[in-house]
Amino acid sequence: MLELFAFGDTGWGDELLKGFGVTVALAVVTLPIGILLGFLIAMASMSKNSTLHWFGIGYTTVFRGIPELLTLFTVYNGAALLLNRLAKFANPEAGFVELSPFVAGVVSLSLVFGAFSAEVLRGAFQALDKGQVEAGLAVGMTRIDVFRRVKLPQVWRFALPGLGNLWVNLIKDTALVSIISLDDLMRMTQVAVGFTKKPFTFFLAACLAYWAICALSEVVAARLETRANRGVRRA
Amino acid sequence: MDFINVIITFWPKLLHGLGLTLLLTGLSAVLAGAISLPLAVFRTTAGPWAQFPMRLYISFMRGTPLLGQLFLIYYGSGQFRAELQSIGLWSFFRDPFNCAVLAFTLNSTAYQIEILRGGLMGVPAGQIEAARAIGMSKLQAYARVILPHTYRIAQPALGNEIILLMKGSAVASVITIFDLMGETKTVFAKTFDFSIYLWAALIYLAVTTLFVRGWRYLEKRLNPHLAGHAPAEAAKPAMGTR
Amino acid sequence: MNITRRLAAFAAIATISLAAGLGAASAEDKLIRIGTEGAYPPFNFIDQSGKLAGFDVEIGMALCEQMKAKCELVAQDWDGIIPALVAGKYDVIIASMFITEERKKVVSFSDPYYAAAMTHVTAKGSDIKDFSDAGLAGKAVGAQSSTTQADYVQKVYPGADIRLYKTQDEANLDMANGRLDVMVGDVIPLLDWATKTEDGKCCELVGEPITDPAFVGDGVGMAVRQEDNELRESLNKALAEIIANGTYKTINDKYFTINVKTMKKE
């Protein structure tokens, strides 16, 4: 049984580990892009400008309302089509522009992560105490200073539990990218199953690996929360 | 083919797919709802050691991709075909629809236990004491006081869970089920027309929106005394993905 | 307006540089680059030494020898195999590609170098003998999605319970598990699976091969860029020659027990 997971040519250990690496890379690359996007969308939906406001609301409604798998297919097939039309338009002799599964994965997971994190961040901004902002301005801080030194640290604190949850969801969602043939953990598991005909063994191993990252993430998130909440008085 | 013609030609397929998506989601949500209630009561009353297996189960279900769970049940069951046949269960696992319902039910049960646990713990202790004080038995207190209150508290979160389950059910398409996602993929493979994805997105959005409306209406009927108040934290729309 | 003009200028420059590039390529002395997938045994695969091998590859090499040309092999994923030909990554695809109307819109095909055929697979001892829609009504019929065989089962067996899989492997797995009553796929890979693999032992190829040109096209051909008529014609000529001089038969017999040009036993 263990020899199935051996490294080298005899077992699937190295292939699965490579897939695991791709899964982690996908999540790690998506996270900052997704948070940045979520931040911008949160800003838009809190904006007084009604176009921006409705764009923000519409964006979060759409990307939270449709299945992640559908977003992924739409990006993978649709964006590739769009890119090629643009390339052909710019240069009729242009060759084929390929949207790699990794890029398609990062783009679609970021779109989804952006929508969910926008809601978390919006909630965090709205939970801010207005008096603190006024106090900051009163002691002579500039608006940028207030944002950087008063608002951000607290938004971070309020948003952390929500973002931690979203990170776990992101890791799980990366598995969907296997369906568009990215060699992530789930896909390498399927390849191994194709050769060994031991589906239960390998899918269980893959699930345990995802479980391990998620459990580890929860521990790290709890640490970060404790750190972010240091100095906060408890009622 | 253009945006309009695609839907004129293929709407019966999408409609059929939508029916299957709703059936998968509804069946799994109801089954999970029935299983999770006694488990949630157990989760709030049993000691930590008795709870340990359940907590492990919940953690596993929430810490692994639904796609992995589905593969584990669908393809994984094939590894034990002989054993399953000998106890007469293979005919159940042979059908992909059954496997999907099983996977979604097991998954949703984990989430619904935690939601109901939150509801059970939110029932004020005074109410339970009052129920016992006027002579209700434990069972009566649960049936008449605790559970009605629990479901009122948990109702918004349960609505979220059903939406997440419906979105998650799109993975059923990878085990050969022609749900809305599956039908959409076959239409795309035939036409290479990308607008079919946009139509599918519109349909999913419409279903989600209608469901949210209906659920809110139900919420108002269940909690008339809260009408006009800001929705509770749990009532906020879907806060996760699968 | 301004942007359009700039794009037009960009397009013009790009066109010129591309044309220059093409000129340089054709001036070179008859180097032909062959693109293949390398993941479709026994037609094309990576052998233990890491080199491309298989029936397609050997046919390609024999053609090169016949044409007295220098050849080079390039591996390319199936999904991008036509776009990369058009973009000029190689000059000809020899990768067991069915000649279909869809593909003809983008590339030109040589004469077929082997016959395309699909087959039904059932479990050994299965009582299914009638491969009509009525005979398969309600039966679980599987195929790989986005393929000609998926088209076939959907059109010919509307009354069956159709199951489409992302890969042939997954379909094979469910066939071996007994979830499928019938599977439809390409003859040669399925023959390989049913006769040479452990889990394929469950099953056998049954019925007449499906050769309806409406589904399998005109056979399997080599694809070249539409403007490369000269290369197409010299490939056709060389193909006829290696069939006439017996080279084709030697390669055929190395891999198969039937003649893949006719799909019949000799």
Image: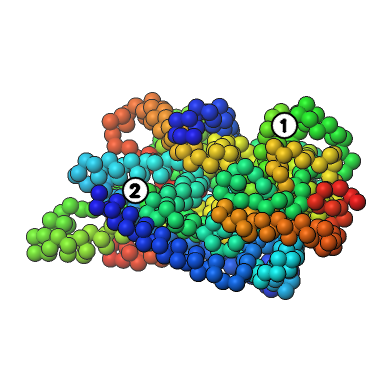
Disc 2 packing (10 Å; few <14; some 14–19; many ≥20) = many
Q: In front here: B50 or B231?
A: B231
Disc 1 packing (10 Å; few <14; some 14–19; many ≥20) = many
Relative placement, left or right, of A54 versus B190 is left
**Is C220 placed above or below C37 here?**
above
Per the image, the residue denoted by label 1 is C157
Kind of element beneath mark 1? loop
Relative placement, left or right, of B76 versus B141 is right
The spot of residue C199 in percent (x, y) is: 81, 53
- Residue drawn at the location 61% of the way across and 51% of the way down: C108
Kind of residue indicated by mark 2: Glu
Could you tell me if the residues under marks 2 and 1 are in contact, i.e. CB atoms within 8 Å?
Answer: no
Per the image, the residue denoted by label 2 is A119
Relative placement, left or right, of B230 versus A199 is left
State the separation of the CA atoms marked 2 and 1: 48 Å
- Chain to which the residue tagged by mark 1 belongs: C
